Amino acid sequence: MPDSYSRRNFLKLSAALLAGGAAISAGAPLAQGMGFSGTGDAGPVNEVKGYCPFCQVRCTYRARVRGGKVLSVTGEKDNYWTGGAMCPKGMSIVELMGSPYRITEPMRRTSDGGWERISYAQAVDMVVERMAAVIKKHGKDAANRVGMTMPLWDCRESEIAALMMLRIAGSVHAMPPGESCVSSASNMLGDMIGVNCGSTKVDELPKTRTLVLWGANVCELYPPYSRWLEKAREKGVKIVYLDPRRTRTSLLADMQLRPLPGTDGALAAGALRYILENGGYDEERARFQIEDFDALAPDVESFTVERVAEATGLSSEEITKFYALLAGSPRTIVWLGGSLCRYTNGINCVRSIILMQALRDNLIGEGKGMLTFQSGKPAGDEEFVDHYFGETKTPKMNFRRLRNTMEKGRLDILFLNSSYRRYPDSKGVRKAIDKVPFVVHCGFFLTEETEAADLFVPATFGPESQGSGYGNEQQVVWREKMVDAPGSCVPSWQFYRDVGRRLDPERYPDFRDPEDLYRRFSALIPSWKGMTPERLRESPDGLVWPLYSLEEKERSGSVFTEGKLLTPSGRMKVVHPLFGQPSKWTFPKGSPLGGDHADEFPLVLTQGKQLWHWQQTLTNFSRAVAQFSNGRFIWVHPETAKALRLEQGDRVMLETIAGGIEGWVDITENVLPGTIFTPSNLNATTPLAENRSEHISSILPNYWDRISCQHNGVGCRLRKLA
């Protein structure tokens, strides 16, 4: 086990979990801070099943409800995937629902830039009038004049309702959130193995021999899943963690390698060379899965251990030890972290890792495969929408094209649901949004998205509406409405249904609630026919998609049930005309380690999530989680701090070629010399100082690979403030 994750951070985690335990077990004063809203009115306490919307672990819980108030939420102890765990983010929802900072009435922008309160009916009228005007003016071209940032977090039915509303204008431009976190991995998995998500389930971890957490910081991003790491350790599984930082996940690893940020692709290409050179593979099985197998050896020939050591900063000894473990493991699962996709060389890196798994025959079979983060969305949405609105040949935009469209003044309506600050150069993104004549934001608090909008529609938190959700294991869960929402808050499914029905009552289905829409969906889509609301209600952890009939049992383990990959040819390619091959590896664009860097920005910038911050920043309005937050801290290695004459707690300006933001120096060996780390998901508009900072994307350059926007590895500097 790596020896020194910061004691300060470890104790902080312990305090968070202790507070969480108190919150779900008793109404003590400390519990009030972790989400209790008070005792509620007199009367019986009812338990209602629900699920957390804040990440794709999709924890289920039991809510204690009395007098129209949710008193507390407790993780569902019989949940197979979580074992009853919940993290501070999920538990904060009780406080967020009753937050004094919550906006509960619709508002529209006035001519002088202020806000005025309007009714919900007026809000619907505004959207209907704008949509109708765009459709009338542009006809078929209206399809490219309307866009949306997804997803809608209250329930899956809201996403479907929104997609159908867009299709009234012919639009298919709903930006997936994965474009800024996992789209490189998703697309490469789809291209190379035929499934664009994990090829196995997390419960396979105890059945493997070697688990490689390649950038997968499980304990901070998906803390309830740390139980599966512990289960694997109990079965003797060797856990290898690859991350430049020491994190909570380091505590559960048998071996950690800390390569320089953005050099994982070189490490993976070197593994391919080592395995080929040392005969640690079955050539017949390798050829069965790799179409142009003979191209592999010459392609990776230059990635010697010495070259890999020079690129990654790792020693030859630790590289060789890692490679020997991979070459000798009969069953290996690789868990891809979203961080791998956040470099401009992420595509190349992910392709090399997938090829490595195929070369070792570690894709097909028990205890083998790939896992990813945020990969669980079941299929069927497009087929369902096409049923009502017909197929469309309009190509979908990615966010880069959408931004370009906004900058040119060619987008008339933007439904801004998820944070635009997820994208690099968020200041530039905001300027593009400001060119859109009509921006609608469904939200909860005063955020940068609210400030960018012309119309604000107050949304509901999960317990205030019925609906289904999906998780990382493609499990679908169900939630009943528990309490009424305050003021004029409406669930997003209702808002988009009301707009859709007004615009096109002939085609837009007249569903009355999420259960009605869900039943129509599951009756129409074959892979959902066995996933009835009745079965979902009975299950403590949902049902794993697909289920084609009521008699069919849930599937787990490998998706390759026929013993071959799911690509059209049943194989993958080393050389790809668009995405390249391992030999094309280079340092990330803008990295001080590469050739295109600026000398005045010599440090490598990395950023990421914290245990208590959800990516959409809503948790920044929770005082309960704010007590564990440190604002804009910047981890700096002692050697780097000494060279820059920085002391613990110094205020600095963190600068890149795109701008600067203030923070404070936290000196720690949890980062490598010459690199820094700072949290992603702070919020400039929260009233809670512990969570307040301009978003990190405001100083990240607008870099893209062929698929996704990039966040990590660019050059930066620290300038001490007086």
Image (spheres, rainbow, N blue to C red):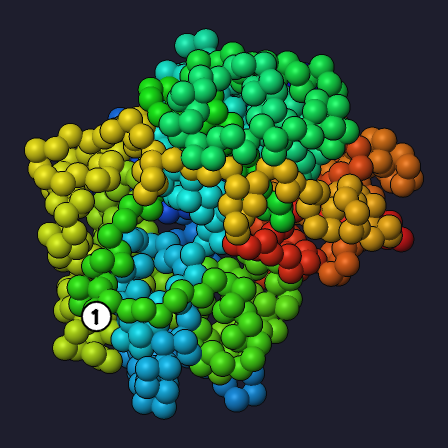
Q: Is residue 612 left or right of residue 715?
A: left
Residue 485 in picture, x, y percent from top left:
31, 60
**Residue displayed at 22% across by 64% down:** 386
In-front residue for pair 36/158: 158
The structure residue drawn at horizontal position 53% and vertical position 51%, both measured from the top left corner, is 578
Q: Residue visible at 27% across and 49% down?
A: 379
Q: Position of residue 603 (x, y in %)?
A: 79, 43
Quarter of the N terminus within the rendering: top right
Position of residue 275 in the picture relative to residue 80 (left or right)? right
Residue 149 in sight here:
no
Residue 197 locus on image (x, y percent)? 39, 40
Tell me if 138 is positioned left or right of 611 in this view.
left
The residue at the far left in this view is: 551
Q: From this view, report whether residue 538 is shown above or below residue 7.
A: below
Q: Which of the pair 684/474 is nearer the observer?
A: 474
- For the residue marked with disc 1, what is the amino acid? Phe
On screen, residue 200 above or below 511 = above
Depth check: give the residue in front, 600 or 320.
Answer: 320
Helix, strand or loop at mark 1: helix
Q: Residue 2, relative to residue 606: is it above or below?
A: above
Relative to 103, residue 527 above or below: above
